[in-house]
Amino acid sequence: MNRIILRTVLAICREYRLVVGVILVVGITQSFVGMYSLVFFQRLLDGLPAARQFADLLPALAGYIGLTALNHGLIYAEGYPTSILNTGAAQWVRLRAMRKVSHIDFLAYEDVGTGNLIQTIENGAEAARNILTGFYLNLVRGIVPSILFSLLFIGYYDRTLFLVIVAGYGILYALTYYLMNFLRREMEKMLSSKQDFSNFSVRAFMELVVFRINGRYKAEFERVRQISDEIVRARAKVYLLQELFATGFAFLVFLIEAGVIVQQVGKILDGASTVGTLVALVSFIRIVLWPITTFSAAYMGYKTDAVTYRRFHEFDCLPDDPGLLRGSQHAPQHAPQHAPQHAPQRGCDVTVREGTIELRDVSFTYQEHAVLSHFNLKIEGGKTTAFVGESGGGKSTLMRLILYLLKPQGGCVLVDGRNLAEVNLESYYREVAYIPQEPPVFDGTLRENLAF
């Protein structure tokens, strides 16, 4: 799954490569500038006792003010491209989903369900955005540079402290790794419960008549309430674990800071260090340890979003209608890992002239129920034909077979003598008009709906 997510991240980065480049350059520069300003602040503090006039402090003061102003300017400059990438990453996934729906197999589409599909797409879009900007970009542009630059400056002031912090990082990483794995398992349980809650509640919202007439609301409410209680308990458990880690980590940082202060005070009294160096070291220690907390939160978010995006990927890997993929122009971009490695052979275009439709020895089974068995029908072109029958008799199935949304398991469907299994369905659909039993009314004017 991590490879799939990484491929998605790289695909979005290629789409917005200029924006990503600007964010990385500006963000890494901002990290360095912000820390380098502390060096000038240290020089300013150390220069105060020996300064006789304001001009003696001017170089250090100007450097500190200038770098601080530049730091804030870079933070502001980074906001615009970050906003573009945040929105663009989510839109990239939504557009990919629309491309997928345009050629998905009809039975696979119906099995997913419209409500579940919309939720899967929206959640997948948000997850992809969070994974890209909240984890990978945050890691490359913020966390890693902060660690490297702060360690560099700490080593500049005190090499022994540098080695101690590097060793401490290894211990903290091990502890964080085991804690994050435990939290991930708890989050996966909570997400599974949230998915169940959403599925059951959505169907109760969408099928008011069915639930009300059949008296199902009371039982459904109890079922959803139990799932809701599980979500609340799981979230509280995750919160306690996160707070335990945050509190323990804050106490650890305090101990390190206290140790450095004691060490530096001793050096200052011996004339081996300065107050400015003490202030700079404490500041750099807070910066170098801050990424641990940030990474823990980002990693936890990544694992949560990875579970969410996995559901979107499962939708993205659903089978396609081969009749819509006959030809390279219909092949989906960025094909999923488990998609067929070869495209179907290009089908011939079809032009309807007489309009004769024939179902020859057609059989179709849905969910182990034989809807049609060795069925034969011929409809002459230029005539009006109506299918009349009881509910569940196969009228809708018959129409979907004629439209070749459904594929017969036996026999064939012919239009003007041409087998629809061998044609490019996009050319066929250009010859067909379809109005469903309950025509949808889209957002827009009456004219726009009629034109559609």
Image: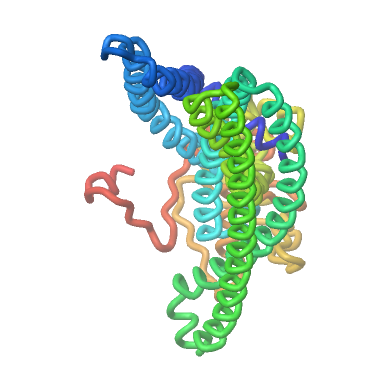
In the rendering, at what x and y percent does residue 104 appear? Answer: 61, 44
> Residue visible at 48% across and 57% down?
385
The count of marks equals 0
Q: In the picture provided, is 140 more to the left or to the right than 159?
A: left
Q: Is residue 11 visible?
A: no
Above/below status of 92 relative to 121: above
> Residue visible at 45% across and 31% down?
85
Q: In the picture provided, is 81 more to the left or to the right than 300?
A: left
Q: Residue furthest front?
A: 270
Q: In the picture provided, is 274 more to the left or to the right than 421?
A: left
Q: For this rendering, which residue is in front, 362 or 184?
A: 184
Q: In the picture provided, is 295 more to the left or to the right than 353?
A: right
Above/below status of 108 relative to 192: above
Above/below status of 111 relative to 340: below
> Residue visible at 53% across and 51% down?
123
In the rendering, at what x and y percent does residue 63 appear? Answer: 36, 14
Where is the C terminus found, in terms of image quarters?
Answer: top left
Q: For this rendering, which residue is in front, 208 or 173?
A: 173
In the rendering, at what x and y percent does residue 129 appear? Answer: 51, 39
Q: Is residue 131 visible?
A: yes
Above/below status of 240 relative to 36: below
Give the quarter of the image for residue 321: top right
